[in-house]
Image (cartoon, rainbow, N blue to C red):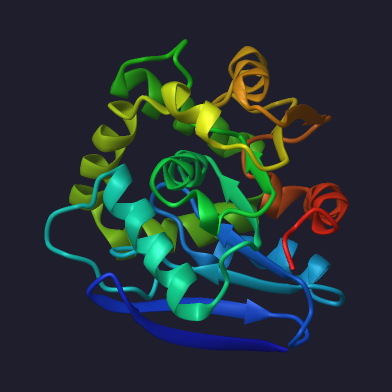
Amino acid sequence: MITHQFTGAAGTRMHAEVTGPAGAPEVVCVHGLGCSHRYFRPLARTLGERLRVSAPDLPGFGRTPGPRRALDVRGLSAALAEWLRETGRGGSVLVANSAGCQIVVDLAVHAPELLGPVVLIGPSTDRTAPSLVRQLSRLVADAPRERPSLLVVLAWDYLVCGPRRLLATARHLRDDPVEVKLPHLTTPAVVVRGSRDPIASRAWAQQMAARLPAGRYAEVPGHAHALNHSAPAEVAGLVESLVGSAPR
């Protein structure tokens, strides 16, 4: 059963789509640039029989209103931290995709007590493509490798957040020194990418995993960037392998 929760946090009403039985171990999904809770639905359905899965919309995205100016990485991670505290979900397994990985890594810097085990899917921003133009060109290259159903979801989500917020947030992500922050993320972590992902290269994902104190690398053959949508069973297996290490 899917429910929608609205929680006062970060100066707005943060929306989250929630799936799964009450009282089950908690999983929180953190979306990427321009996205929302909607592209996590395949993963939430896969996990929802055994786990309680929440996919919040960060301020300015999905169904959560945001400020006029786009939040930077610290602003987005601070909003996530407040939502985790207000909803009592601190210590949950965190599953992040793309830009969401940078938000979770930043969370480890200023609110490490809120982190449980972490799955980082296709982490941005790959330092082998340091310019914004190259990053966005990789995003375009990924589109034909994804399922058509994802493109429909993203087209609506990008329209909702708008091009100005999308571009401003992309600039903040480009300037975020995520690699410097990785040692702060000390909980068990898996960095996973699809073998056909043009956004997060294998070298970048492996480098991130190596810099995490308790990190490991995994790869899903034949898939691209948004594994939470295209390979939910494979991602669910990684999530379930970490549930036992989440704090009670």
Q: Is residue 221 visible?
A: yes
Q: Is residue 224 left or right of residue 238?
A: left
In this view, the residue in front, 38 or 77, is 77
Q: Position of residue 180 (x, y in %)?
A: 43, 22
* 174 versus 31 height, above or below: above
Using the image as rendered, state which of residue 244 and residue 122 is in the foreground. 244
Q: Quadrant of the N terminus?
A: bottom right
> Which image quarter holds the C terminus?
bottom right
Residue 44, picture quadrant: bottom right
The front one of 57 and 148 is 57
Residue 235 in the figure: left or right of residue 122: right
Residue 137 can be seen in this image? no
Count of labels in the image: 0
Residue sitting at x 47%, y 22%: 179
Residue visible at 75% across and 58% down? 246
Please provide percent x and percent y for residue 39.
58, 60
* Residue 67 vertical placement versus 99 (above, below): below
Please tell me in which quadrant of the rendered image residue 90 appears. bottom right
The image shows residue 59 at horizontal and vertical percentages of 31, 65
Residue 178 against residue 14 in the figure, above or below? above
Residue drawn where x is 30% and y is 46% of the image:
74
Residue at 46% of width from left, 72% of height from top? 85
Q: Quadrant of residue 208?
A: top right
